Image (spheres, helix red, strand yellow):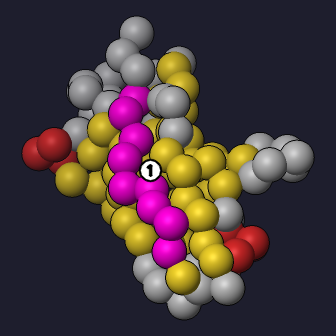
Amino acid sequence: QVQPVESGGDSVQAGESLRLSCTVPGFISRRCTVQWWRQAAGKQRQFVGNFTPDKGPYVPDLMKGRFTISEDEATDTVYLQIHRLEPEDTARYSCFSCGAWGRGTQVTVSS
């Protein structure tokens, strides 16, 4: 089992953008979906979107417009781009893929 590794979280001002990375060695050859989730303090984990080899990215309707998912096959990395960040986006963003969770990366948005 290979643990996903997230990075890119930061403390930013509302309106800025961030690109988060999730690296999962071998997820393409193993045909694993890479899921992005987030969890704010005191709230349930929320599904943000995913990338599936041979299918591409998926973002639920609730997240469309400000959240974009892309992939770099050469580095086994799936990106989550968040545009026009809002304080409500403050959360720990984590990946799940090939049966394992990453440790997450913290995004904090101040108004």
* Residue 92 sits above or below residue 69 on the image: above
Closer to us: 49 or 107: 107
Which residue is the extreme one toward the top? 1
* Residue 90 sits above or below residue 99 on the image: below
Q: Residue at x 50, y 66 (%)?
A: 11
Residue 42 spot, x, y in % from top left: 88, 46
Residue 25 appears in the rendering: yes
* Residue 86 sits above or below residue 92 on the image: below
Quarter of the figure with residue 64:
bottom right
Closer to us: 29 or 19: 19
Residue 56 spot, x, y in % from top left: 40, 56
User: How many circles with numbers are drawn on the protein?
Assistant: 1
Per the image, is 101 magenta?
A: no
Per the image, is 11 magenta?
A: yes
Q: Residue at x 52, y 39 (%)?
A: 104
Along the horizontal axis of the image, is 48 left or right of 98?
A: right
Badge 1 density bin: few <14, some 14–19, many ≥20, Cα 10 Å: many
Residue 106 spot, x, y in % from top left: 54, 51
Residue 69 appears in the rendering: no
* Residue 87 sits above or below residue 27 on the image: below
Which residue is the extreme one toward the left? 74
Looking at the rendering, the stretch of residues picked out in magenta corresponds to 4-12
Closer to us: 92 or 21: 92
Along the horizontal axis of the image, is 18 left or right of 92?
A: left
Q: Secondary structure at mark 1?
A: strand
Along the horizontal axis of the image, is 21 left or right of 26?
A: right
The amino acid type, in three-letter code, at marker 1 is Phe
Q: Residue at x 55, y 59 (%)?
A: 107
Q: In which quadrant of the rendered image does the N terminus lie? A: top left
Q: Residue at x 67, y 85 (%)?
A: 111
Instruction: Tell me the residue that label 1 is attached to.
Output: 51
